Amino acid sequence: MQNRIAEQVRQSLDKVREDLDTLELWLGALQGAAQPLPDYESPFRRTRIPAKDVEFRQADPVA
């Protein structure tokens, strides 16, 4: 009887942990969606180079 109850408690705790992980994921997504988009200006806007012909590289790291 004790083993059965202990197993049910373990399963319940595992379920709570899964639910907390899911909740944390959705709260992070909601927080990100609530932020305004940062201003962005394409570096290729003035060059008139078609985007398909541009070779992308990683941005220089900020010191």
Image (cartoon, helix red, strand yellow):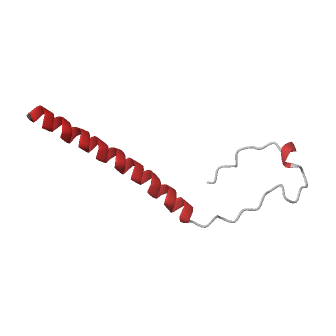
Q: Is residue 43 left or right of residue 35?
A: right
* Residue drawn 89% across the image and 55% down it: 47
Q: Position of residue 7 (x, y in %)?
A: 19, 35
Q: Position of residue 22 (x, y in %)?
A: 41, 49
Q: How many marks?
A: 0
Q: Is residue 29 left or right of residue 50?
A: left
Q: Position of residue 27 (x, y in %)?
A: 45, 58
**Closest to the observer, 15 or 49:** 15
Quadrant where the image shows the N terminus: top left
Q: Quadrant of residue 32?
A: bottom right
Judged from this view, the residue extending furthest toward the left is: 1
Q: Position of residue 41 (x, y in %)?
A: 76, 62
* Residue drawn 35% across the image and 50% down it: 20
From the viewer's perspective, is residue 8 above or below residue 47? above
**Closest to the observer, 41 or 26:** 26
**Closest to the observer, 53 or 31:** 31
* Residue drawn 85% across the image and 44% down it: 52
